[in-house]
Amino acid sequence: MEMSLKEKIFNIIQIGDKSNRISRLFDIFITVTIVSNIMVTFLMTFQQLKFLFPLFKGIEYVTVLIFCAEYILRIWTAELLYPGMRKVKARFRFLISFDGIVDLLTIVPVFFLSGFVIFRMLRVARIFHLFRLNAKYDSFNVITTVLYEKRNQIISSVFIVLILMLASSLCMYSVEHDAQPDVFRNAFSGIWWSMSTLLTVGYGDIYPITTLGRVMAICIAYLGVGAVAIPTGIISAGFVEQYQGKSSITNVRDTDIKEIAEIFVDRHYAGKTIEEVEEDDNIKIFLVLRDDLSILPQKDTVLKLKDIIVLRSANENK
């Protein structure tokens, strides 16, 4: 009976369970609670609303009590979240997981509001609750999928930006240090200038005064526009690919089933990318079935032996 009750509670508090109406209502309730908590924290920074502070405090304590109850329930049902683990190990696994840490950081600041500044700053962790909720739904999954699939390109572009910042800071320090030693005191001052120039329009607290320094600043500012555009373009292309893939799968439902074919990947196709197969055989691949996985095809997806591809002749799409 205890496990039955535990399973019911576990199914309710699981985020993104669309098949369980009570779970969906619980998600909505938690979302309203999180938004209320964040809004109260925001409004309490306005001294004009000081007469409402007691009400805000009451809302904050009620919402935190809800967070505490949810946190306790998640610890209690952790063994169902990590099946196969012992009860103690599963609970410890949850405590050190992202969700567990976010839950803890949401609760802790309330008890230390008058203590260290760091505890008051931890109130911002409540916002991560919203990310945790959205991560279980399709709209936010697109973002996380794009960032994961394009991680190598994004890391490379960030590395280029860092190299450009380092090079520009050293160059500007060499040119401007003698002219204004109090401003460009060291290489770090140059890094601050390069960051504000490459990634923004500059703050105006540090700027070159020599002719050579200004010419360099113009060039670096133009390079900054291109450097910022690189990761932006990568992420934008990733979004387009994801939505095109989802649209292709959706369009299959409106297609005559007789026009759809499933074939096993043999040695003729194995090792080739989706793009190569589609161009060589003039077909459109909608889905790749690999073991127990259903893979949305990307241009650079490599087919493996014994994969099953769901396809349609490209001529019939026209």
Image (cartoon, rainbow, N blue to C red):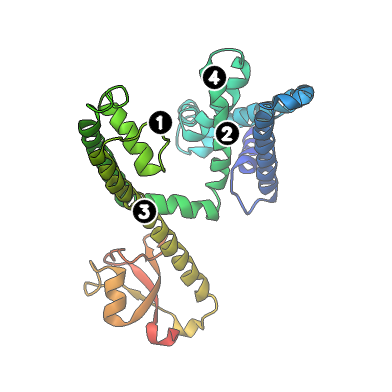
Cα distance between the residues tagged 2 and 1: 54 Å
Specify the label residue 119 is tagged with: 4
Above or below — where is 221 with respect to 101?
A: below
The image shows a total of numbered marks equal to 4
Q: Quadrant of the C terminus?
A: bottom left
Is label 4 in contact with label 2 (beta carbons under 8 Å)?
Answer: no
Q: Of callouts 3 and 2, which one flags the residue occurring earlier in the amino acid sequence?
A: 2
Residue at the disc numbered 3: 229
Residue at the disc numbered 1: 205
Residue located 58% across and 21% down the image: 109
Residue located 28% across and 64% down the image: 302
Residue at the disc numbered 2: 77
Dot 3 lies on which element?
Answer: helix
Can the viewer see residue 159 in this picture?
A: no
Q: Nearer the viewer, mark 2 or mark 1?
A: 1
Is label 4 in contact with label 1 (beta carbons under 8 Å)?
Answer: no
